[in-house]
Amino acid sequence: MSNTSTVTPEFLVGLPKCELHLHLEGTLEPELKLALARRNGVDIGQNTVEEVRATYQFDSLASFLAVYYPAMEVLVEEQDFYDLAAAYFVRAAADGVRRVEAFFDPQAHTSRGVPIANVILGYSRAARDAAELGVSAALILCFLRDFSAESALETLREALPFKEHLIGVGLDSDERENPPVKFQPVFELARAEGLKLTMHCDIDQLGSIENIRQVLEDIGVDRIDHGTNIVESPALVAFAIERGVGFTTCPVSNSFVTADMKADEIVQLLRQGALVCVNSDDPAYFGAYIAKNYVALVEKADLSLDDVVALARNSFDASWLSDEDKAVYRAEIDAYVERFVNV
């Protein structure tokens, strides 16, 4: 199955895939942001879609976050969170996504007075309705690492009454001076409550390898988000492969916050047998939903059909689906590829 002629953008769009690194707040398109601002009477300082889009400019993680969090002020009521997630699921379905395990940041909302119930219940309702689009969806509650560990613990305890709506917890936002072990007790409680664990290890951060070591050895996460700096430590790569830890890479967003897509690192991990997969991160801001990320990586790294299929299979294998469900989706991939190869 090495034929490369079928690795077209159209093939990549239709390829069944799982998205494991997607921030729901990062899907806030300018049109919806402006509509929600008007609905909720929030002055965002822009009056047209073009003016909103012009604010989506950044050249580093810090400058991105400076745009990202203020934009969330338009999200207030449960219906707002539903509308945001529902719009994303429509786009995901059009990109061949069959399963999503999506991040959300409750502290970005509760810190400005929005009840956590509005956030979780709005997103959860949209996740249930995504089934009508052929998309299975689950939610991962992320803690903001530039908030205190006490705030994270309080957020987890506030969210536990809604645990049935969650599949896991994560850690995102500014990694500088916020190492994973800062949140180790919070993640231990989440694990004790039956939730899966993942953490961002952003690319090219100060102390990247030590942070990756912490998430693997000290905390024992099930997945790592980004994490491609691990190639600097063959021992950690081998450890992650042995444990079956997934890596949720985001090629297009990498190229915005650094000078590189990290294609070489992604391919290196793929070749070594790591569960590396492709995702879109914050697609409204980076201008690329998941299929465009596949296209960008294929073009940059000259990937073969076998490579692309491996990435898609990895996305399901790294998910938190049951083994039975994973087998169903792998069979979907095989059937899809067989149809195209034999055309």
Image (cartoon, rainbow, N blue to C red):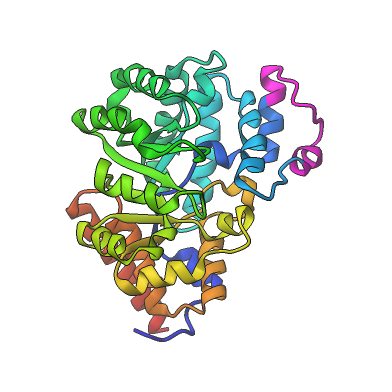
Q: Quadrant of the N terminus?
A: bottom left
Q: Nearer the viewer, residue 228 or 53?
A: 228
Q: Which residue shows up at 40% across the image and 64% down it? A: 232
Residue 60, percent from left and from top: 64, 48
Q: Which residue shows up at 72% across the image and 46% down it? A: 57
Q: In the rendered view, would you say 259 is above or below 82? A: below
Which portion, as a residue range, is magenta?
A: 37-54
Q: Is residue 78 visible?
A: yes
Residue 132 magenta: no
Task: Please tell me in which quadrant of the rendered image residue 70 appears.
Answer: top right
Q: Which residue shows up at 55% across the image and 19% down it? A: 77
In the figure, is residue 127 to the left or right of 320? right
Q: Nearer the viewer, residue 164 or 333?
A: 164
Residue 114, percent from left and from top: 52, 16
Q: Nearer the viewer, residue 177 or 267?
A: 177
Residue 49 magenta: yes
Task: Please tell me in which quadrant of the rendered image residue 179 appears.
Answer: top left
Q: In the rendered view, would you say 238 is above or below 76? A: below
Q: Which residue shows up at 58% across the image and 49% down it? A: 283
Q: Is residue 135 visible?
A: no
Q: Nearer the viewer, residue 335 or 51?
A: 51
